[in-house]
Image: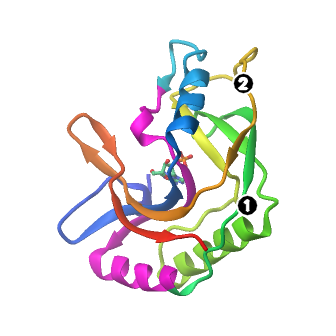
Amino acid sequence: MTNSTRNISTAAGKRVFLGFSLTTEQTKQIEAIQLQLPANVRLVPSQNLHMTLAFLGYASNETIGALINQIEAIDKPRFTVDLDCIEHWKKPKILCFKGTASDPNLLSMANDGQTIAQKLKLHQSEYHYNPHITLSRKAKAAVDGICYTTLTIKPSALHLFESFAGKDGVEYPILHSWQLT
Ligand code: 2AM
């Protein structure tokens, strides 16, 4: 585990990421998929379901202030993405519901997120942006035969989330939100 991925939340800073919340309907659709997953995986609780735009790792409170100003200044256009494929990712050991970032509005926000991360010396992704919702963690293998339909994500807001280790597990409180235009 590197510094940027260590689970720390102190008075001096927080572990943060940019992402999108789901609607109640979308959450229900994900829950219906989760019900079909094998018992040996750890389901992401409904209140934690989200689609990450950029994981930024640990940031000091000063950097979080600068981050909010930088996000304020970029274009945050509305976009659409279809999640249509359930995949197992070996390295993070997750099962996720994944789509392709073909909407230029989503791609430009993902790229701007990485540029800002670089400027502020925050965690940057080593991969191209892959829109997905993590369904479960501790998943050792792929799953077959899941019944689902395409989920269209069209958020109206971008959020800056904290990833906080609460006493009953990880929590993702929203620190700041921006309307997509
Ligand atoms: P996810 O987007 O695949 O679900 C908060 O930790 C969120 O940021 C998680 O949902 C997590 O995975 C995402 N994330 C992306 N890269 C990460 C990393 N290197 N370490 C921890 N979380 C990361």
Residue 162 picture quarter: bottom left
Does 124 lie within the magenta span? no
Per the image, label 1 sits on a secondary structure element best described as loop
* Circle count: 2
Of mark 1 and mark 2, the one earlier in the sequence is 1
Residue wearing tag 1: 128
Q: Is residue 155 above or below residue 78?
A: above
Front in this rendered view, residue 32 or 55: 32
Instruction: Please give the label number shown on residue 148.
Output: 2
Left or right relative to 94: residue 106: right
Q: Measured from the top left, where is residue 105 in percent x and y?
A: 73, 70
| Of the pair 157 and 106, the residue shown nearer to us | 157
Q: Is residue 56 visible?
A: no
Q: Return the x and y of residue 153 as percentages of the image width and height.
A: 66, 49
Which residue is found at the position 65% from the left and 46% from the top?
132
Tag of residue 96? none
Residue neighbourhood size for the residue with mark 1, other residues' Cα within 10 Å, grouped as few (<14), some (14–19), many (≥20): few
Q: Which of the two discs, 1 and 2, sits closer to the camera?
A: 2
| SS at badge 2 | loop
Type of amino acid at the residue the image marks with label 1: His
Relative to residue 119, is residue 161 drawn left or right?
left
Kind of residue indicated by mark 2: Tyr
Residue farthest toward the left in the current orientation of the protein: 11
Which residue is pictured at 41% across the width and 79% down the height? Answer: 68
Please indicate, yes or no, whether residue 37 appears anywhere in the rendered image. Answer: yes
Q: CA distance from mark 1 to mark 2?
A: 26 Å
Q: Which residues are magenta?
A: 43-72
Label 2 lies in ligand 1 vicinity (Cβ under 8 Å): no
Residue at x 50%, y 67% (from the top left corner): 123
